[in-house]
Image: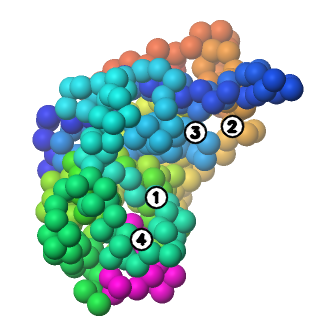
Amino acid sequence: MSTTNILLKVNNLKKYFPQKSGVLKRPKNFVRAVDGISFEINEEETFSLVGESGCGKSTTGRSILRLHEPTSGEILYNGKNILNYSTRDFRKLRKDLQMIFQDPYSSLNPRMTVKKLLMEPLLTHNICTKKEAEERIIAIADKVGLAKEQINRHPHEFSGGQRQRIGIARALVLNPKVVILDEAVSALDVSIQAQILNLLIELQEELKLTYLFISHDLNVVRHVSDRVGVMYLGQMMEMAKTEELYSDPLHPYTKSLLSAIPSSDPTEKKERIILQGDVPDPSNPPSGCPFRLRCPMAHERCKVEEPMYQEVKDNHWVACHLYNEIN
């Protein structure tokens, strides 16, 4: 059960990547990967970001950790803007903010044993003695379902699900407050996905963790989330509590995404909303509403006026001129 204390707050976050050309490699244009999104995450809450590939959700997660340095905006952790921190000060904070990646194998050094992989961040941050670190490693390995004797093996000796357990252990060994999960289960078989998701839920309850869960799988998101934000072309289209978003979506993009979720009931007739065309080029977004070129309801106002992102119901935000006409 989440609290109401805001732990992480993102205000008007932007991340633009320059497109360079010519002999001098000067910026010719900018890819607006994240284009002014805002949200907050309460302590012990799971907030999810969803959307099609290329919508900017992973860039958002990496920008929060300053793996991509944000172009502008604020990222408040415990009320302090961490974008104002020096590199040295932010390195000290890094133990509180950890990330679990989609591909555990590429994020783990193949030359190091699991023990060394888990030992490295503890010694880097000078958190404890080597003996204490060894005790902590055994304890966290046990929490994620790895046997004591397995910590002396290398990553290639494990299955995909086991490697993701190692990735989880590496993130949690520092006792973080916030964990960003970037498509953390999308590369796993469905049966293994369920095991890892249940493990993450158990660890969140036991260790009182706060999650930013990034995924394109809306079935998974519904299972783990307290609230959900829907991104498109670097902007937030809709945000609400999970059950309200799934039962009463107000944005046509959200409705389209939800219509694609397979039904568990084979007799249920479900109308699929197929979007026309591709996601526009983020270096040259359309005028007005960013979704208008693919929206089945778009009209003249959508071409010239960008919709305001506003709270239209209690804790339910949407950026659409037509939200009253959706249902």
Q: Main secondary structure of the magenta part?
A: helix
The crowding category of the residue bearing disc 1, from other C-alpha atoms within 10 Å (few below 14, some 14 to 19, many at least 20), is: many
Element at badge 4?
helix
Compute the Cα span from label 1 to label 3.
17 Å
Q: Are the two marked residues, 1 and 3, in contact with CB atoms closer than 8 angstroms?
A: no
Residue range highlighted in magenta: 150-168
Q: Which mark is residue 55?
A: 3
- Above or below for 130 versus 326: below
- Above or below for 58 versus 27: below
- Outermost residue, bottom direction? 149
Q: Indicate the amino acid at tag 1.
A: Phe
Q: Is residue 306 left or right of residue 191?
A: right
* Closest to the observer, 11 or 97: 97
User: Which numbered mark, 3 or 2, is in the foreground of this view?
Assistant: 3
- Give the x, y percent position of residue 189: 50, 76
Mark 4 or mark 1: which comes first in sequence?
1
Element at badge 1?
loop
* Closest to the observer, 83 or 74: 83
Compute the Cα span from label 4 to label 3.
25 Å
Q: Which mark is residue 279?
A: 2
User: Which numbered mark, 4 or 3, is in the foreground of this view?
Assistant: 4
Mark 1 or mark 2: which comes first in sequence?
1
Q: Which residue is mark 4?
A: 164
Q: Which residue is mark 1?
A: 101
Q: Is residue 274 left or right of residue 258?
A: right
Q: Are the two marked residues, 4 and 1, in contact with CB atoms closer than 8 angstroms?
A: no
Q: Indicate the amino acid at tag 2.
A: Val
Mark 4 or mark 2: which comes first in sequence?
4
Element at badge 3?
loop
Compute the Cα span from label 3 to label 2.
8 Å
